[in-house]
Image (spheres, rainbow, N blue to C red):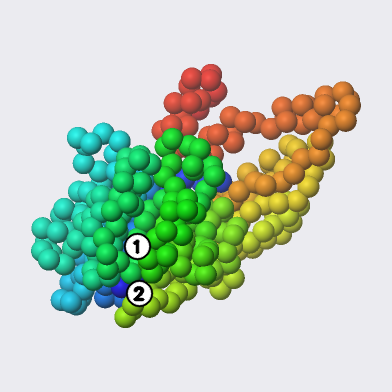
């Protein structure tokens, strides 16, 4: 059984993108999802297949079709759908996109599509606890994990001090994890996007299987899915920062942007240092590159030096003022939206 998580289909990303690149990123994630499905005839989605509890209908339909085509190809194929924190509405009366898709698939493929919200068996030896409303609920479910569990699928943070102090975030602390692993359970966790292992390999954060942002690329140079077979497991690589022709990752100095010619689409982190007087140049260079770039996301991580005196401050302010912020905004809008904004601001159309 293949365990995947945090694909975030229907991703709505604004920062570092143009309208065209944001749409291309959504299509890229759909394509990667279809590729990952083909790895195994048994799949468990361990949370956050969708980016939001309500995604655009086109993304819901594409995901439904991808799973339907995969199931239809072989009669023995099965899928378990487990909601993560992005998959459920905070209003219990409102059906989320993930729940709707799951119900439609269950109706079309009875006995082959399983939906687990709360807790339940995925298959012999594999048990899952989905995202739940609060930490108290998670602690309750963890306290009643049945005997016979060899692999436990969770969607939460692993031993995160930040999560432990936040009322809205779920966390499996080290004490809880040690108690579970002492029972011979291997914990498999979704939610965190960077893969890692701890507790002698008995606590596994799989990480997501394809990047949806530059930050997804910064930790591991590869991404993996977990394949559970015959009471053991192994990892299968699903993405590499260096080898992907579509979805690669690169760090680029802002002063080198003008000379870059891309092959395929990727994720670019613009770095380097700049003086205060160059702040406006950095903005212009990145904006111009985004408009001609093929990449999904181009993020700005340039360090601007600290200003030392009033003359530097005055010069920097003038430089930034020289950047037409309105035009930078309009570059990211559709023609009708551009026209409306120009009318509001008194610009000529």
Q: Residue at x 38, y 53 (%)?
A: 155
Q: Residue at x 22, y 49 (%)?
A: 99
Return the x and y of residue 195 as percentages of the image width and height: 51, 62
With 79 as the anchor, is 289 left or right in this view? right
| Of 186 and 309, the residue lying toward us | 186
Relative to 228, residue 53 above or below:
above
- Earlier sequence position, callout 2 versus callout 1: 1
Count of marks, rendered view: 2
Question: Residue tagged by mark 2?
Answer: 228
Q: Residue at x 68, y 40 (%)?
A: 283
Left or right: 284 with respect to 154?
Answer: right
Foreground residue, 145 or 72?
145
Look at the image and tell me whether residue 171 can be seen: yes
Disc 1 target residue? 152
> Real-space Cα distance between discs 2 and 1?
11 Å
Depth check, front residue: 209 or 273: 209
**Left or right of 236: which side holds 160?**
right
Count neighbours of disc 1 (C-alpha within 10 A) and say few if under 14, some if 14 to 19, many if 20 or more.
Answer: many
> Quarter of the image holding residue 318?
top right
Q: Position of residue 214 (x, y in %)?
A: 56, 54
């Amino acid at each position: 059984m293949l365990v995947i998580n945090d694909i975030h289909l229907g991703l709505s990303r604004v920062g570092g993108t143009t309208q065209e690149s944001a749409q291309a990123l959504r299509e890229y994630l759909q394509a990667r999802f279809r590729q990952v499905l083909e790895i195994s005839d048994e799949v468990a989605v361990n949370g956050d297949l969708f980016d939001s509890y309500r995604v655009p209908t086109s993304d819901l339909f594409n995901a439904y079709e991808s799973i339907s085509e995969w199931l239809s190809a072989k009669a023995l194929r099965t899928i378990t759908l487990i909601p993560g924190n992005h998959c459920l509405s905070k209003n219990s009366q409102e059906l989320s996109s993930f729940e709707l898709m799951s119900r439609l698939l269950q109706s079309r493929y009875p006995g082959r599509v399983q939906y687990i919200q709360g807790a339940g068996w995925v298959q012999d030896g594999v048990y899952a606890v989905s995202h739940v409303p609060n930490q108290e609920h998670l602690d309750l479910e963890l306290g009643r994990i049945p005997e016979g569990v060899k692999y436990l699928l969770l969607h939460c943070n692993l031993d995160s001090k930040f999560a432990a102090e936040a009322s809205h975030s779920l966390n499996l602390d080290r004490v809880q994890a040690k108690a579970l692993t002492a029972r011979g359970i291997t914990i498999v966790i979704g939610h965190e996007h960077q893969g890692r292992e701890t507790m002698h390999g008995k606590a596994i954060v799989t990480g997501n299987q394809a990047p949806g942002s530059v930050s997804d690329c910064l930790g591991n140079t590869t991404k993996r899915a977990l394949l559970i077979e015959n009471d053991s497991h192994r990892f299968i690589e699903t993405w590499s920062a260096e080898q992907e022709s579509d979805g690669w990752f690169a760090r680029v100095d802002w002063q080198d942007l003008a000379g870059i010619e891309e092959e395929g689409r990727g994720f670019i982190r613009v770095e380097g240092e700049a003086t205060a007087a160059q702040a406006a140049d950095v903005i212009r260079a990145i904006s111009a590159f985004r408009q001609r770039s093929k990449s999904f996301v181009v993020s700005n991580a340039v360090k601007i030096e600290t200003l030392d005196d009033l003359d530097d401050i005055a010069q920097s302010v003038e430089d930034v003022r020289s950047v037409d912020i309105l035009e930078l905004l309009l570059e990211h809008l559709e023609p009708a939206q551009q026209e409306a904004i120009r009318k509001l601001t008194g610009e000529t159309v």
